[in-house]
Amino acid sequence: MSRSLKGFMWATDIGFIVYWLVTASHLLPAEYLYQDYENELLVAWNWSFVPLDLAISATGLWSLSLYRRRNPAWPALAALSLALTFCSGLQAIAFWAIRGDFDPLWWGPNLFLLIYPLFFLPGLIRVQREGIRTSERGPAQ
């Protein structure tokens, strides 16, 4: 796992946990909230991301832990975390685009979530394939 992937995953995973704790505690000033924040439907839409975002954090932090322990399952969990991260960003961007609502404070982080996994997924897939090929050969004689 590259140093940059570790950094991006750690920041994203901890970032999601912090974001949801801050959101649940109502600590964000109104000027940083999305448009129509008082609309119950939009509040429900935002909260609908909690399971996805926490799954991203759980799989990402778990993969980092497995990597540190040299467990060969780490690439699969990292790839799952990145795929879920991509989906989280895509869903948010699609929603705001359909509404015709462009706010750089919301688009920026979600474009990050959409784009950064694309730089690392091909390498993780390659690592996973190489691991499968190695295990198919059996132990070295």
Image: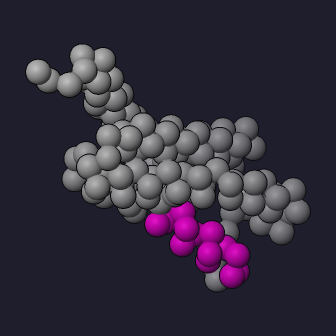
Q: Quadrant of the N terminus?
A: top left
Q: Nearer the viewer, residue 140 or 111?
A: 140
Q: Nearer the viewer, residue 21 or 42?
A: 21
Q: Is residue 62 visible to the viewer in this orientation of the structure?
A: yes
Confirm whether the magenta stretch covers residue 16.
Answer: yes
Q: Is residue 102 visible to the viewer in this orientation of the structure?
A: no
Instruction: Name the side, left or right, on which 32 lies relative to 13.
Output: right
Color style of the picture: one colour
Residue 27: x %, y % from top left: 64, 83
Q: Quadrant of residue 97?
A: top right
In the displayed structure, 70 sits above or below 118; it is below
Which residue is located at x 82 percent, y 58 percent? 44
Number of numbered markers: 0
Residue 18: x %, y % from top left: 54, 72
Instruction: Name the side, left or right, on which 25 lies relative to 41.
Output: left
Q: Nearer the viewer, residue 22 or 42?
A: 22
Q: Which residues are magenta?
A: 14-26
In the displayed structure, 72 sits above or below 138; it is below
Confirm whether the magenta stretch covers residue 24.
Answer: yes
Q: Looking at the image, which residue sits at the far right?
A: 40
Query: Magenta part mainly helix, strand or loop?
Result: helix
In the displayed structure, 38 sits above or below 104; it is below
Which residue is located at x 73 percent, y 38 percent? 98
In the displayed structure, 39 sits above or below 71; it is below
Residue 76: x %, y % from top left: 42, 37
Q: Quadrant of the C terminus?
A: top left
Residue 4: x %, y % from top left: 25, 51
Q: Looking at the image, which residue sits at the far front?
A: 141
Which residue is located at x 29 percent, y 24 percent? 135
Which residue is located at x 66 percent, y 73 percent? 23
